[in-house]
Amino acid sequence: MVEPNYIPPINRGNPANRPRFRIGRILFPLIFAIIVLVALSERIPVIQDAKDKLLNPAEYQARQACHATALAAAEQPAYARIVDRGDAHPTQGAVLVEGVTVGEMGKSGAETTFRFSCYVDPDGKVAKTSRQ
């Protein structure tokens, strides 16, 4: 008669019997998650804003002030939205936010867009605007 193979339960008190920690189990998913976040940061505005707020707080503040002014400049601000957030360029005394695209509901009900640029001073106040 053949005896069945008996595997004793793991003795959790003995450190030699514990499964070993492997860095590969954590490292690969962590690297994958970082790559996915970097790739998505170009597509998701919330991630872009969080990155700008952390890395470039002055440009983030200028962009937010310009967005608020651009939405207020729409004919119907209640039906306006930021389509493209534009680019922020620091100058000697201010930040130029250019290329902000604002979409709003037109008279026929279809969306119309216009481009907006503005200079924002270091205090966060909009100094000059341009609507195209």
Image: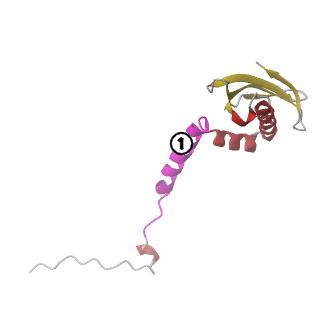
Residue denoted by label 1: 36
Residue drawn at x 82%, y 26% as measured from the top left: 118
**Amino acid at dot 1:** Val
Q: Report the front residue among 68 and 123.
A: 68
Residue extent of the magenta highlight: 19-44
Local packing at callout 1 (Cα closer than 10 Å; few below 14, some 14-19, many 20+) is few
Q: Quadrant of the C terminus?
A: top right
What main secondary structure does the magenta stretch of the protein show? helix
Disc 1 secondary structure class: helix
- Residue 113: give x, y in percent of width and height: 68, 23
Q: Report the front residue among 111 and 10.
A: 111
Residue 61 drawn above or below residue 116 = below
Q: Is residue 5 left or right of residue 2?
A: right
Q: Is residue 63 left or right of residue 106?
A: right
Q: Inspect the magenta stretch and tell me whether residue 41 lies in it.
A: yes
- Residue 85: give x, y in percent of width and height: 70, 31
Q: Quadrant of residue 52?
A: top right
Q: Report the front residue among 48 and 56.
A: 48
Q: Inspect the magenta stretch and tell me whether residue 116 lies in it.
A: no
- Residue 34: give x, y in percent of width and height: 56, 45
Residue lying farthest left? Answer: 1
The colour mode here is secondary structure
